[in-house]
Structures are given as C-alpha cells and as structure tokens.
Amino acid sequence: MTAVHVPTSDVNSEFGVIVAWEIEDRADVTAGDVIAEVETSKAILEVVAPEDGILLHGGALGAEVRLTEPIAHLFDDVAALDAFLAERAAQAADGAGDDGVRASEPARRRAAELGIDLAALGAGSGLVTVRMVEEAAATAAPAAPADLPPLLDAPAGVQRIVLIGAGLGATQVIDILEQSETQRAVAIVDDSPERWGADVLGVPVVGGSDRLGELFEQGALDAVVIAISTSVPARTRLRELCQIRGIPLANAIDSSARIGRGVQMGTGNIICAFCHFGVEARIGDNNFFSAYNSFEHHNVLGSDISTGPACVTSGLVTVGDRVRMGTGIFIQPHVELGDGVQVASGAIVLSSVPADHAIKTKLVTTSVVPLRAS
C-alpha cells in the first residue's frame, strides 16, 4: 500500500478541498496519471499517482482534507485493497483503540487537539464522532495549566480582544489592532498545546479555545476575533462555539480600508490593508478579507467567507455563506455565488455559480533560466 499526498509548498494552507477526482475509485492507475485536483487557499493543485496501482479515494468530492494526510492510497491488487477496507471497518466497529473507546480516527485527532477525555465521552454513547467531541469541548470545564502567561493589560475604555488561532492570520490581526486606539489584542488561544506559553508579536498564547468561556466569565476579555484565514469550516465552527458561550465577536479593520457610504457590516470581520467596500454594500459576520480586496457598490456578502488578496467584484454581486476565494479573482456584475462555493486563484467569473460547486483554473507552468550575459 502506498499513501498519496497533495504536493504543495504552500505554507499558508493547512487544508485543501477535493474539487475533482480524475480517476474513479478502485480503478487502475499508472505512475504519473493525474488522479485528483485539490484546492488550497492559493491555487488548485494536481495530485499525481507516484506509482502504478489500484486507487482508493480518501475522501468524497468537496471534502476538506488536511494537507499533511494522504488523500488516497494505491494497492498492488484488489485483494490488498479489500483487506485494507475490511481492517478499517473492523476497527470502526469494535472501537479500534487501546483505551477501549469506540471512536472514529478523526474524532480521536480532534479530541487530542481539544483536550477532551474520550473515555468519559464514550461511556454508553456508541461510536464517538467529531461532532460529539466538539460539542463536549463547547461545554467542558476549562483546565488550563497553571504556568500559562497572563493576559496583557489594556487601558480603560479600550476593547480587550482575544484572538483564536496563533498562526499567520494572528500576525495580520495583531498588526491591524496595533493601529487602533480603541482595541487591543490581549491574548491568543490555540488548540495546539505546543503553542501554549509562546507569543505572537508579543501577544501571549494562553491555552486552548476551551478557556474562552472562563476568561469571558471572569471579565478578562470583551470580544473575540477568529484569526484563522485558511479554513472556512474552522472559522464557522469557532463562530458557532462563541455563540454557544455568548461571547461577542469584534471587527478588526485596517486603517487603510475604505468603507463606503451606507455600508452595513456584521461582527467578527477581518478587513486587511487597502480593502474597499462600495456604497451600500452589505457584509455578514466572521469573514476574512485579505489585502487589496474590492467589493463594489450594492454587493451582498454572506458570513464565514475567506479570501486571498486582490479579489475584485463589480457592482450588484452576491456572495453566499462559507465561500472561499483564492488570489487575483475578478467577478462580473450581477453574478451570484451560492453557499459553499470555492473559487480558484486567477478565475474570471462571468456567470452565477450554484451552491457547493467549485470554479477551477489551471496553473501555468513557468521556468527559471539564467540571464544571458550582455
């Protein structure tokens, strides 16, 4: 058995979406065949078979996959593939874990990230799923290590912001908030324990997202900004987590942004440098707009949207919820993008796109050659 991974050096992306399977499940493939296309936050990447074999898909069309994990496997013959599936099914059925808990592998990974005790969660509940783990995390009592750093202070009257996510998006949000006289980033929470106790641009990482309820009840924060740009599902899930706990979201708007007359805006939006929103545009909640975006007059933008830099729309464009756009995208007037649409970098969108569809573009291969001596 050979695992097939997405070939990417895109350090800004942790996740991708399977936008095409070029070869059917359980079909024969030859080394070098393009078997799938996966969209990251920056581009659509072709996944090539590293050797001959029989292909087993690792996810459904439209599924989000972690780029460090395989999206497919190759087998020498059908018998080996069937044996692999049988073993995996048996593990799911009998609880596949030394702890005796029946839990899916994704649920185990999520429980490790959130610090959830599967043994307690799995008692009498059948197979533990990712949703069950996340629901438990939303109500679990926080148990932060005693040696975590304290939150930063903020002057009286300044909104104290806690960021969710200690990755590259946090650096962008901190830079925005440092321009503000009315907001300050006082801490970061991140569900990766290895980041706890560190800092991002001087802002301490004080534990996981399970601490948010405790900190809010203590009056240590006023609002939250979700500083994750590359995963729409993560942004959506964390917004819902804050709603469950009654924690407000705050907008983080770069001082260079241009907000036109009559613009209506929700909460939790991150608006990076030199963005423009035209007259009477309407903006939902919890969106991440990268630098140099321009949404023209009377656009209607939903919630949980994430964009790369330089996305430009004409007037009267509608963008649904959970839409993800790459870099350098142009959208014509009156176009509607349905909920969950994925738009690849470099796309020029001339007509409307129904919900849960992807707009693909092919990357142009470039070569680097020595300069000629003059």
Image: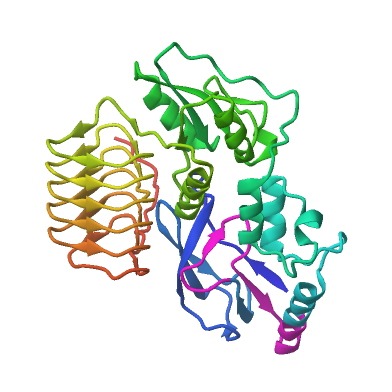
Magenta span: 59-83
x, y percent for residue 327: 32, 49
Question: Is 286 situated above or below 359?
Answer: above
- In the visual, does 258 lie left or right of 80? left
Question: Is 6 situated above or below 266?
Answer: below
Residue at 77% x, 50% y: name it: 117
**Among the 4 quarters of the image, the one containing residue 197:** top right
Q: Nearer the viewer, residue 279 or 67?
A: 279
- In the visual, does 283 lie left or right of 234? left
x, y percent for residue 127: 73, 69
Q: Nearer the viewer, residue 287 or 142?
A: 142
Q: Quadrant of the C terminus?
A: top left
Residue at 44% x, 26% y: name it: 174
- In the visual, does 54 lie left or right of 152? right
Question: Is 246 situated above or below 349?
Answer: above
Residue at 18% x, 40% y: name it: 263
x, y percent for residue 14: 54, 50
Q: Quadrant of the N terminus?
A: bottom right
Q: How is the image coloured?
A: rainbow
Q: Nearer the viewer, residue 168 or 1?
A: 168
Q: Residue furthest top?
A: 155
Q: Does the stretch in magenta take in 152? A: no
Residue at 57% x, 30% y: name it: 217
Question: Is 135 situated above or below 207?
Answer: below
Q: How many marks?
A: 0
x, y percent for residue 42: 40, 51
Q: Does the stretch in magenta take in 63? A: yes
